[in-house]
Amino acid sequence: MTTPHLALSESIAAVVEAAGAAVVRIEGRGGAPLSGTVFPDGVVVTADHALDHDGPISIGLADGSTVPAEIAGRDEAIDLAVLKPGATIPGPGIWAETDALRVGHLALSLARPGRTVRASLGILGAIGEAWTTYAGGRVDRYVQSDGATPRGFSGGPLVDLSGRFLGMNTAALVRGASITLPASTLRRAVGDILSTGRPERGFLGVSCQRVPLPDPVAASLRQPSGLLVFGVQPRSPAAEAGLLLGDVLVGLDGEPVARMGDLLGLLGARRAGTKASVRILRAGRLEEASVALGARSC
């Protein structure tokens, strides 16, 4: 008689076998072993941080064959590289949204750093709202599994126990931990890369550092700090809008800017070419400036 434990074990093994067909090995690079995941539109997504961009690249498939590939584009701010295979490869699995996920759900991290698929079972230990990476990349949800993700698991998928692909794992965005880029973030980023060759992320063109605001201004704005502008790139959106050295950025489109992460996150959620309202403190006075955001390439 089949016990519930044996039935669950067989079910998990079947999911790994089926989903593993869409997990590939990235070959021909220096550095760490690297996995990839077959994505819609005939491309493969993988982690940018472990990819050698100078050498030739091949993709190792589940059947043992290899196909050449080239880099279609990168979004370093979310640690994503998109590869375009030189031949048709097996289709992707079913990619699901993460809205219904709950802390405590079981999930599988899959990888193919060698010739065979590897798997790690864990629970979803953290699920949060949208967040911004240290480089200003916008991620739709914070998803983290407690399953082990050894060397070579970056670029592989997180899969639920129905075999649906939830996102791509990466160990480069949060210190000491692996997190998952959800399917919605991948769709947006891959779409931008395939249409324009780069991520579409708003660009202002300033160099800043955090500074405390004068007490009356801090009390009025209900924020303790802003960003002192110490550099303005020539012919940048900031220069065209008249921003000057010594201005202090305190807001963008009505949202507070108290630290660099605030500014990067707000720019990351806006497309190039859109208009934005920048609030600055200049010579002790609060002023507003309209700026047409440019395109940031990474």
Image: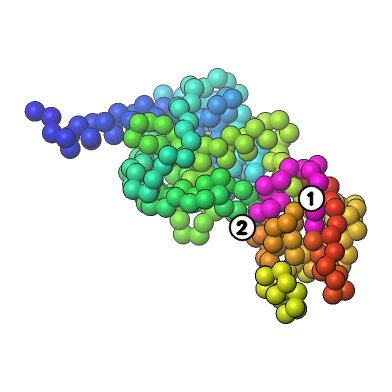
Judging by the rendered image, the residue that carries numbered circle 1 is 276
Q: Is residue 70 above or below residue 250?
A: above
Q: Against 233, is 61 above or below?
A: above
- Split into 4 quadrants, where in the image is the N terminus? top left
Magenta segment boundaries in residue numbering:
265-278
Q: Which residue is mark 2?
A: 134
Q: Nearer the viewer, residue 191 or 221?
A: 221
Residue 101, percent from left and from top: 41, 42
Magenta residue check for 166:
no
**Left or right position of 173 against 288:** left
Front residue (pair 286, 155): 286
Q: Amino acid at mark 2?
A: Tyr
Label number found at residue 250: none
Residue 92 at least partly seen: yes
Count how many numbered circles sit on residues in the image. Answer: 2
Residue at the far left in the pictured view: 1
The image position of residue 190, as x and y in percent, is 62, 34
Q: How are the residues colored?
A: rainbow
Residue 36 visible in the displayed image: no
- The image shows residue 142, relative to residue 62, as above or below, that is below
Question: Is label 1 in a helix, a strand or a loop?
Answer: strand
Q: Nearer the viewer, residue 245 or 88?
A: 245
